[in-house]
Amino acid sequence: MTELIKRAETALKEARHLLDGGFGNGAVGRAYYSIFYAAKAALRAISPELAEAKTHGTIMRRLLQHLKAVEQNGSELAPIVKRALETRHQADFGEPPMSADVAKTFIDSAETFIAAVSAFISSRTP
């Protein structure tokens, strides 16, 4: 397991704790970071240079370009990646606060994403 995947899993646990405490916006923020760390881990597994970027948007765009390497057809993960920045932005700046249902759905999507990236990385490790 890579350090970035460990960070992703920790952020996901934090998201669940925040949700359990009634902090939907905070839960979405931590779930977003779990996706971001896993995205960087996937890109690093493909080519370390891909994981080096100045913006989160660049990381997410690069991952979308390389999803076929991570997932056989990219169809399950692409909507998660596309929704990640938008959902985080809504949690940080939108009104009203994120509902528990929306936050839970996003956390569940993050878990799916991390599992797929972890499997991809494991398949590349001898």
Image (cartoon, rainbow, N blue to C red):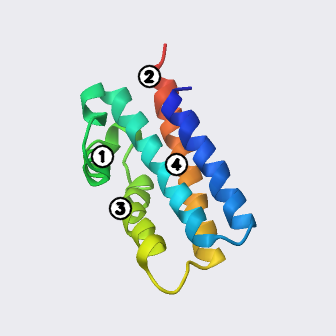
Residue at the spot 65% in from the left edge and 52% down from the top edge: 14
Q: CA distance from mark 2 to mark 4?
A: 21 Å
Residue 31 vs 120, above or below: the answer is below
Residue 53 vs 13, above or below: the answer is above
Q: Earlier in the sequence, mark 1 or mark 2?
A: 1
Q: Nearer the viewer, mark 1 or mark 2?
A: 1
Q: Quadrant of the N terminus?
A: top right
Q: What amino acid is labelled 4 in the image?
A: Ser
Dot 1 crowding, Cα within 10 Å, few <14, some 14–19, many 20+: some
Residue at image mark 2 = 124
Displayed quadrant of residue 48:
top left
> In the rendered structure, are the residues bearing label 3 and label 1 in contact, judged by CB atoms less than 8 Å apart?
no
Residue at the spot 25% in from the left edge and 44% down from the top edge: 54
Residue at image mark 4 = 34
> In the rendered structure, are the residues bearing label 4 and label 3 in contact, judged by CB atoms less than 8 Å apart?
no
Q: Nearer the viewer, mark 3 or mark 1?
A: 1
Residue at image mark 3 = 82
**Tag 1 secondary structure:** helix
**Tag 4 secondary structure:** helix
Position of residue 13 measured from the top left corner of the image (x, y, whole percent)? 67, 49
Q: Nearer the viewer, mark 3 or mark 2?
A: 3
Q: Earlier in the sequence, mark 3 or mark 2?
A: 3
Q: CA distance from mark 4 to mark 3?
A: 14 Å
Outermost residue, top side: 126
Task: Tell me, for residue 68, which label it has, or none.
Answer: none
Dot 3 crowding, Cα within 10 Å, few <14, some 14–19, many 20+: some
Residue at image mark 1 = 59
Q: What amino acid is labelled 1 in the image?
A: Ile
Q: CA distance from mark 1 to mark 2?
A: 20 Å
Position of residue 81 measured from the top left corner of the image (x, y, whole percent)? 39, 56
